[in-house]
Amino acid sequence: MDQPTMPTPPMPAGLEPKKKGRAKKIVGIGLLIFVAFFAFIWMATGKISEAAKTHLELIKSGDLPAAYADTSEGFKDITSFEEYENFIIEFAVLEKHESVSFSYRNIHNSEGYVEGTIKEPDGTAYPIRVDLIKENGEWKVFGISLEEFDEEYVEDDFGFTEIPTIYQLKSSVDLAEDGSLIDEKDVFSPDERITLSGYISILPKGTTMVGTMYDSEDNAYYSTAVEFEQSGSDAQFYFFVDPTTGDLEPGNYMLEAMFEHESFGEAIFGFHFITVE
């Protein structure tokens, strides 16, 4: 099957492609002593994923006029109802799917997309991507694409799914109980606690996470690890580094989150850069 794509406006600038990380070597431990703690918070896939699922449920119900009305104004400007209806008819899995799950999301301001798996009643599964844009405070669909599985998809505890991706890495002083960032920033004072948080699209049971803070010379000030005893998807994680015996030296630093699991094939990396001044 070719990769069918419903007509879609050009993707807005700012949505970053998935990137592979690079391995880093720990070459030394700094003089300062830091305490680093790891935790993860299971978060719902968010309103953007809910909007995508709601749209697919409208298609499944057979109410295509309502589903078409649920698309964005920009989509309707370039795609007629007849074109939309023909796309749905051509790819029956959209109207007859048994289940759909999203394992990856990318949001930038008022634009974003989700990716995951849509399954037919007989178990046949296809990767699916839904592009959305926020209009009047609500997420609206402006593109759907389907494709066959390829080497970038693996089978694990969740069935066929995308190779895990780390996304939305941000730094702040701390996190609130609901996972929101407290005092988000990239520039810290020497005595401030530094928290790195982000999401991993798939987290199998037994995954090991290693968090490391490097200076501009690639020297590791601190590195520690934790093994997760639960599995899930779209998991928020964080670790923080807190000076306990002295201030952090001014300069540029890199925070690295590395995840390893036998199903990944290779380690998954995420990087974020901060400044201390």
Image: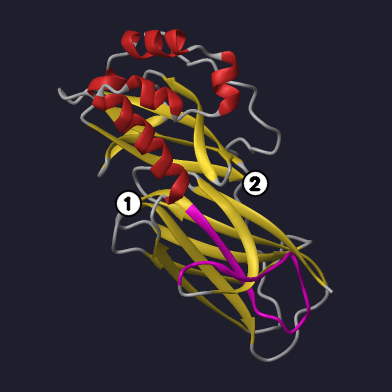
Q: Amino acid at mark 1?
A: Pro
Determine whether 233 is above or below 99 in the image: below
Q: Left of 256 or right of it: where is 57?
A: left
- Range shown magenta: 178-199
Q: Is residue 162 above or below residue 209?
A: above
Q: Is residue 163 visible?
A: no
For residue 156, above or below residue 66? below
Q: Dot 2: what SS?
A: loop
Q: Which residue is mark 1?
A: 204
Residue 229 placement: quadrant: bottom left
- Counting labels gives 2
Asked if residue 162 is among those painted magenta in the image, a careful observer would answer: no
| Disc 2: CA contacts within 10 A as few (<14), some (14-19) or many (>=20) | few
Q: Which mark is residue 109?
A: 2
- Magenta stretch encompasses residue 192: yes
* Residue density around tag 1, few if under 14, some if 14–19, many if 20 or more, within 10 Å: many
Nearest to the observer: residue 238 or residue 142: 142
The amino acid type, in three-letter code, at marker 2 is Asn
Residue 119 in the image: x percent, y percent?
Answer: 25, 27
User: Where's residue 31, x and y in %?
Assistant: 71, 82
Q: Position of residue 145 (x, y in %)?
A: 45, 21
Q: Is residue 121 visible?
A: yes
